[in-house]
Image: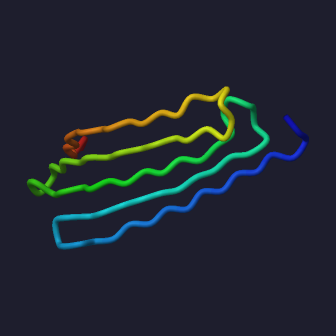
Amino acid sequence: VGDKQSFIYLATAWEASEKLKIAGSYGAVDDVSVADNGSAITVGAFFQLLEKTNVYALFSAFSADDSAGADRSTLSLGVSHKISSKLM
């Protein structure tokens, strides 16, 4: 692990329609640790189901630069609901 660590992160989002948003990101790290050096990509879709409720699906994949680090991927599915209230 060197004195200079490198990190890059790029992200974008696109409104495919009034209710659908597509997003993606790319990140890479170098000279952090043997197991953590590598790059990752994430793509996802967010759909407005109701006025305050969204459903989403995300896929992320990490690729290690060295065989000491394990490649891994994750699939996330979920629902988010915004709750608001007036306190006074």
Q: Position of residue 40 (x, y in %)?
A: 53, 47
At x 74%, y 31%, the residue is 34
- Give the left or right position of residue 85, taking residue 61 as reference: left
Question: Is residue 34 or residue 88 the one in the foreground?
Answer: 34
Quadrant for residue 61, please give it: top left
- Give the left or right position of residue 60, taking residue 63 as reference: left
Question: Is residue 58 or residue 66 the one in the foreground?
Answer: 66
**Measured along the vertical axis of the image, is residue 26 above or below residue 65?**
below
Q: Position of residue 50 (x, y in %)?
A: 8, 54
- Give the left or right position of residue 67, taking residue 59 as reference: right
Q: Position of residue 83 (x, y in %)?
A: 20, 43
At x 27%, y 56%, the residue is 45
Q: Residue furthest front?
A: 67
**Measured along the vertical axis of the image, is residue 68 above or below residue 8?**
above
For the C terminus, the quadrant is top left
Q: Residue furthest left?
A: 50
At x 47%, y 33%, the residue is 72
Question: Is residue 82 or residue 59 the one in the foreground?
Answer: 59
- Give the left or right position of residue 58, taking residue 33 as reference: left
**Measured along the vertical axis of the image, is residue 12 above or below residue 38?**
below
At x 32%, y 38%, the residue is 75
Q: Position of residue 22 (x, y in %)?
A: 30, 63
